[in-house]
Each structure stands twice: as structure tokens, then as C-alpha cells.
Image (cartoon, rainbow, N blue to C red):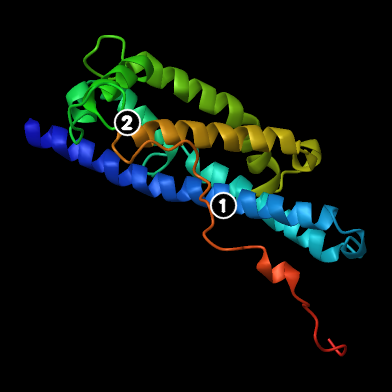
Amino acid sequence: MENKIHSKLDKWIRYSNDIRVDAQNLMIKTKLYDDYIEIVKANKSIQNPDDFHQWIMRNYFESALMSIRRLTDDHRGCISLINLLEDMKCYHHLITKNFYLRDLKNGDGLIPTTKDYASDWFDENYSTNDKDLDQNIVESDIGELKKQTQLVEKFIDNTLAHKNKGSRGKQAIKTEKIRQAIKKIEEVTCKYLDLLGHGSYQELTPVWQYDHKSIFRKTWILDNSL
């Protein structure tokens, strides 16, 4: 029985790392796209013709939408955020407070890496019985995730992944709805990465240790024949 418990927990930890990579890549491409748009907005001389801008915009949104689809794919056998949460909801009792605190040291309750601080955090965010993960908390997170991504998934199915006939194949979606879905994915991913021992993420967008916009400070076309 104990081996089965460890096997299930080990699987969740492995899968959550794959999910972190997918979610982080979604946040990176979103950050790079936003930076690109700000550069173009700030310089009227490069705004037209806009063929390259339109191409970049289409590629970003198609890529972002497919990332959302992959993270919320509930088909059996898929490694996705939604499937991880569903599995954890069914076996919520395996995530105990002792499991959550397993690598932390005792302290005075003031430093976030100490057991007493983390114990209170576990009670506030994951548990209602001071012992293990509350199934209802996971269910609530699943509901919020589906609420924010359902419209996006429907758009992907009808317009992007498959070209349906009639009005369904001509649906549009507001950028605001896509951004809300991305924000919710980041929020839920951070929460369960923490629960499974990957660290307390506040966000998944990394801080660049170099000037990633430096290529835009240089002349691009050196030969007028191009």
C-alpha cells in the first residue's frame, strides 16, 4: 500500500514538472509578444506595412491557444493541468501536511521556509482539517479553471483545430478572454507546484538576466537589395 502511495505522489511530482514547463513557455511567449507590441506601438515609422506584425500576431495567438488547449486537455492519458487536478481530487488524502512539510526546517514562524509558517499556509490554502488536502478546494480550483478556459477551448475546437462549417467556423474571441484564461492557468499552476514541493512561485514569467530586446536596437537590413 505504501509503495502505491509513493508511486502516485512520484507521478504527480513528475507530471507537475512537465506542466510547469508548458505553462512557463506560455508565459514566456506572452511576455515576448507583449514586449514586441510595445516596441511597435512606440515607433510609428515601423508600423506600416504591417505584414510582419500581422504574421507575428497570428502566430502568437495560435500558439498560445494551443498551449491553453494542451494544459486543459481532459482526454485520458494526457499530461495536463486539468488531469493532474482531477487525479489529485480523487486521491486528495495522499497529500498530507507532513508530505507538504517534508523538506522544511523548524523555525520561529516568520521565515517562509520554516515548518511553522508553511503549516499555517497549508491550512489556509489547501486544507480544512489540519491534516490533508481538501477535496472541495481542488474541485473549486478545477471549476474556476474550466470557467476561464471553456470559451477559449470552444473557439479552438470550432475555428482553430477544426474548421467547422457555417457560423461556428467563423467565431471570434476577444483577447481579454484569452488573457483571463492564461492568468488563471498561471495562478492554478503556481498553487499546485507549491503543494507538490517545486517551490513557492508567485508567477511563471522568468526575469531575463540580459537585455532580450537588444536585437531591436540594431539595424536589421544592411543590404538594400534585400
Quadrant for the N terminus, please.
Answer: top left
Q: Is residue 47 above or below residue 217?
A: above
Of 15 and 192, nearer the camera is 192
Q: Callout 1: helix, strand or loop?
A: helix
Residue 141 picture location, percent across and down: 46, 23
Q: Callout 2: helix, strand or loop?
A: helix
Using the numbered discs, state the Cα–Cα distance from disc 1 to disc 2 in whole angstroms. 23 Å
The image quadrant of residue 217 is bottom right
Q: Is residue 17 left or right of residue 189?
A: left
Kind of residue at badge 1: Ile
Q: Is residue 181 above or below residue 89?
A: below
Question: Which residue in the structure is indicated by mark 1?
Answer: 28
Q: Is residue 43 left or right of residue 168?
A: right
Could you tell me which residue is drawn at 22 percent across and 26 percent down?
A: 115
Of 24 and 103, nearer the camera is 103
Residue 12 picture location, percent across and down: 28, 39
Looking at the rendered structure, which numbered label has been put on residue 195?
2
Rate crowding at label 2 as few (under 14), some (14 to 19) or many (20 or more) other CA atoms within 10 Å: many
Could you tell me which residue is drawn at 84 percent across and 54 percent down?
A: 42
